[in-house]
Image (tube, helix red, strand yellow):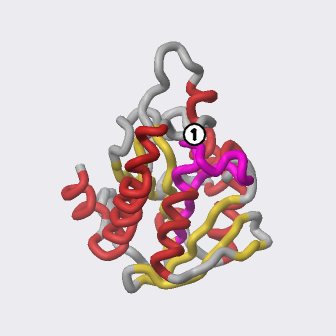
Amino acid sequence: MTAGKSTDWVAGEITLIVGLGNPGPSYAGNRHNVGFMVVEELARRAGGRFTSHRAGADVGETRLAGHRVVLARPRSFMNVSGPAVAGTASFFKIPPTDVVVVHDDLDLDHGVLRLKRGGGEGGHKGLRSISACLGSRDYLRVRFGIGRPPGRMDPADFVLRDFSAEQRRELNLLVGRCADAVEQLLTQGLAATQNQLH
């Protein structure tokens, strides 16, 4: 971590990479579960696997892009992800500044990726729970755009629906691109990754 208030970040000794989603097969294809999809792709690339952890998450310790990482999927529902994330970070002695959260974002067009450190939660209840339990907003976010709901559909209903048939055709490509961004974040830091993606 660089000193001062710089927005840059470089990977430390160990990084916690959390994918947000809801547990169970009925939610697996939902827009809200894209964070799960990305960490599962990262685990596949690293040859790692998830095991149940007492912190309340499925966890996989592995090396990714040459760096030691802990991949995690909270077993709680999205809106109460915080205790599992904070518990996992505490167990592995990882500070909030070395926590990376991959999540869906309604405010970005479908498939758009943005990275940032700190800031508000933008109405995302999963992020709000994590901020409260970590006691900090100073973690990194990898935002995967899912777009706004059509017409007057309630955003809460929209995020709990599967991607459209058209979107599913390119979903694996977009999930892979997001996984690439996480790996680039580990190897090149936040500023360089932002400069290429944004």
Q: Position of residue 86 (x, y in %)?
A: 66, 62
Q: Amino acid at mark 1?
A: Asp
At horizontal 34% and vertical 59% (from top left) the residue drawn is 177
Residue sticking out furthest to the left: 195
Residue in front for this viewpoint, 112 or 127: 112
From what the image shows, is residue 7 above or below residue 1? above
Residue 99 appears in view: yes
Which residue corresponds to mark 1? 162
Return the residue found at the far top. 152
Q: Of 152 and 116, which appears nearest the observer?
A: 152
Q: Residues within 10 Å of mark 1 (few under 14, many from 20)?
A: some
Q: Is residue 112 left or right of residue 137?
A: left
User: At which x and y percent is residue 154?
Assistant: 59, 21
The location of residue 110, given as percent across then percent down, is 38, 39
Residue 2 in view, yes or no: no
The residue drawn where x is 57% and y is 30% is 158
* 122 is higher (above) or lower (below) than 13: above
Residue range highlighted in magenta: 16-35
What secondary structure is marked by label 1? loop
For the point 44% across and 80% down, which residue is it? 64
Image quadrant in which you'd find residue 153: top right
Residue 169: horizontal and vertical position, in percent?
Answer: 41, 47
